Amino acid sequence: PRPVRLAEYTPPAHLVDTVQLRFELGEEWTTVSSRLTVRANPERIEAGPLVLDGRELELLEVAVDGRPLGEGEYALDAESLTIPEVPERFTLEVTTRIRPQENTALEGLYKSSGTFCTQCEPEGFRRITYFPDRSDVMARYTTTIVADAQRYPVLLSNGNRIGAGTLTDGRHWVQWEDPFPKPSYLFALVGGDLARVADSYTTMSGRQVALHIYVEHGNEDKVDHAMRSLKEAMAWDEATYGRECDLDVYQIVAVEDFNMGAMENKGLNIFNTSAILAKPETATDADFQRIEAIIGHEYFHNWSGNRVTLRDWFQLSLKEGFTVFREQHFSADRYSAPVQRIEDVRRLRTAQFPEDDGPTAHPVRPDSYIEISNFYTPTVYEKGAEVVRMMYHLLGPEDFRRGTDLFFASHDGRAVTTEDFVRALEEASDRDLSQFRLWYTQAGTPRLFVDAEHDPGAATYTLHVRQEVPETPGQAHKQPMHIPVAVGLLDRAGNALPLRMEGEEPGGTTRVLELREAEQSFTFTGVGEDPVPSLLRGFSAPVRLEHDHRDQDLAFLLAHDEDLFTRWEAGQELACRSLFRGVAAYQAGDEMRLDETLVEAFGGLLRGDAGDKALVAEALTQPDEGYLADLMDWPVDPEAIHQARRFTRARLAQALGDDFLYSYQANQEGGEYRPDPGAIARRRLKNLSLAYLVAGGVGEGIEAAREQVHTATNMTDRLGALRPMVAEDVPGTAESLEAFYTQWKDEPEVMDKWFAIQATSPHYGTLAGIRRLLEHPAFNFKNPNKVRAVLGAFARGNPYRFHAPDGEAYTFFADQVLRLDRINPQMAAALARAFSRFRRYDEARQRLMREQLERIRQDPQLSRDTFEIVTKSLG
Ligand code: HT7
Ligand code: ZN
């Protein structure tokens, strides 16, 4: 397949002003009739033939200005319909037939547990009807849906309901009109027998918006949290960005089979059930928080993505990076800002840094793709959000807000680019972002090397900073980037020093250094005694930072830094160093030892009366095996990492047994479950303590876990006990797993957790164990949540077993990729990424993984999605 390139972008030859759609939803097939008003694009000198996208469609009829075309008057191939001769303006009528019930790819119109639903982003609309399926063609849609009244009493589309009626054959119809022009990727339709939970919101200008959430009957008791979150998000966007909801009705529908978390279709969001359904008995604190974040994310898209949309798919981060930033800011305001930042950074480091350092690395604004569905990546989303965050801090909140106001006002109703966004921010501030733009076009995570020099005579302190942007596929030479590095200095008593730079007035205790050159030095004056530097406060830029802090400095920062992020960071670094000493010992066949500095630092955290328990819990959380693998020099040794991590965990638990027990007991609470920040933090610390105790084989801890798994009244506590039991396989685990299954087998979201904790356990997630899980009656290969819970969790969350040296897991996994590729190419391509960084491993593992990649590549029916990942991985 030929790649699509940004450099080859041309405006559409034809524009569509209005679209009238009529769907007849049937049990075997669905008929789709469309009526479009089309005109030549005045921006193009010559419009030429009309070319419409279409895939897997059966064309029944095509007519121009009411006249049906004969066979010689148009041309059809597997991807398009071309009409060579068309007038300047005309109406086009097209009738197609599709088979939603056979659509397992979950793109276009498909059926999920008896409900018709759509997923059109990025290129699903072309699986519904022939259309210029590109985001710069924006039209007004009117949609009529006809279906059996009993099976599908609920018929929904974008916009407002403008008509309904019944037919004599038992069918009924509903008509919807969307007043806002939109690209086809935001079209949505739902038909099913669903329950509706209704509420309403009064906007800042006093308009009433009806809020409707549709779920399967029986799930009505699981939407309170989503509804509350939606109203919070609406109020937040008004207060923070001045953005008001522009709709009369905002609808959300939950479906079980969905490739991602949710979709922001105009006025009709479609959600994966896992991103919406929650009650204390079935959802964890993390689920409650994730739901709030996703509800917010999709709602925020109503402005960042829908009102102002994308010119082309290369601009994807314009909506996704910006919207993730908005979502993270919303969550930070709702819970704890430092903890949110830690979680954002953890995600960036575990998912995006490896991508940026591997064969599928690409810029935040990519410049070519084979299959756009492969570009919904951590780089476009999370790194894209970091780029927006850096601009937010460079401009400051007021200028940034002026910039976004200008952006929304000047591009409302248009399809634009990341460049338009940056330009609006520049115009609204006095900032020059020319060099900063490299963040959009240069791939690779910059590395910063910092050396410090204290001159006691002159009372100066100088930071020498060097930056390197690594080579990435297709980008051999990089230019120096504009990197904001927030720093502070601590005196030996742990106080933050007021900062003053040569030739400047004294400032506060945090200073943002703007790095623009390959090497640069920054000198602070009035620094009498040698300070401890606190670098990259708040993780002010998405970079890998290297400095030569001593372990004692890290422990000191962990105990004293005023910046809570840097405190956590120091603790993680301390833990990583200790783990890598363990890795080296394990590899050399020596005895592993626990570092006293780590024991003291962790003990101090547990015993200290640190107000923010959530932060203590974050600091006590071990870096995961995948992150350690990313940090390790070649070759990654998954076994040594696993053993060192396990050893450290167990020994820490034994050394600090009393503290963990105390923390476990002190953070118990009775009363009603509430997912508020304080209660979440206490549960987190309690269950983290429990997990350590179980890992350390502390009898009282194991007893407590066995009891808690049965007596817990909420899923956070139940899983908080079951997860460490399954990880360690303590006596009684098999029975607890069985009891859990019996209790929750009818709750698909809970079963996903049951699968995932087994798939990630070194005891249950062996190859034989994974095979058993795939054969389990509750597993369903067509449901992406189940595939993620078993295969995704195995590859990502169980590197020790996935990379077993015999390579059998690789063969098995490649078989599953191929099997899934026939059913759902997007999911198969996502799984295939598990092999993409095979070059990071030893030669034997490399050979084994390469064999599997080649075997997949040779499959004659391989999808474009999986082909792209596999060929790029092979390089
Ligand atoms: N904008 C949405 C993207 C999405 C998607 C992409 C490819 C395949 C299926 C998909 N479902 C949703 C999600 C979001 O970022 O809000
Ligand atoms: Zn999004």
Image (cartoon, grey):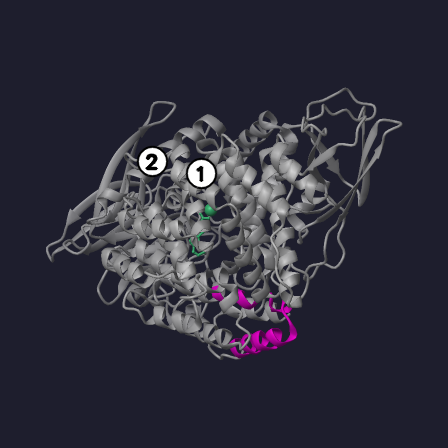
Give the side of residue 741 with respect to residue 623, left or right. left
Where is residue 544 drawn, in percent x and y? 67, 48
Which kind of residue does numbered mark 1 sit on? Phe
Q: Is residue 84 visible?
A: no
> Does the magenta segment cover residue 705?
no
Mark 1 vs mark 2: which is more N-terminal?
A: 1
Residue 131 horizontal/vertical position (percent): 42, 57
* Residue 250 position in % (x across, y down): 32, 38
In the picture, the quarter occupied by the N terminus is bottom right
User: Is any atom of residue 810 visible in this view?
Assistant: yes
Q: Residue at x 32, y 41 (%)?
A: 159
Is the residue 498 above or below the residue 247 in the image? above
Residue shown at the point (65%, 57%) measured from the top left: 581
Percent from the top left, x then y, of residue 105?
Answer: 38, 64
Mark 1–mark 2 distance (CA, rounded to whole Å): 35 Å
What is the quadrant of residue 302 in the picture?
top left
Q: Mark on residue 669? A: 2
The residue closer to the viewer here, 752 or 530, is 530
Q: Nearer the viewer, mark 1 or mark 2?
A: 2
Q: Ligand 1 closer than 8 Å to the CB at disc 2?
A: no
Q: Which residues are magenta?
A: 831-856
Magenta residue check for 835: yes
Residue found at the very far top of the displayed protein = 505
Q: Count residues near mark 1 (Cα–Cα under 10 Å), then give few for <14, some for 14-19, many for 20+.
A: many
Residue 850: image quadrant is bottom right
Question: Image height check: is 417 above or below 738?
Answer: above
In the displayed structure image, the side of residue 448 where residue 829 appears, left or right? left
Q: Tell me: residue 130, above or below residue 270.
A: below
Residue at image mark 1? 300
C-beta proximity under 8 Å, tags 1 and 2: no
Q: Main secondary structure of the magenta part?
A: helix
Checking the image for residue 349, the label placed there is none
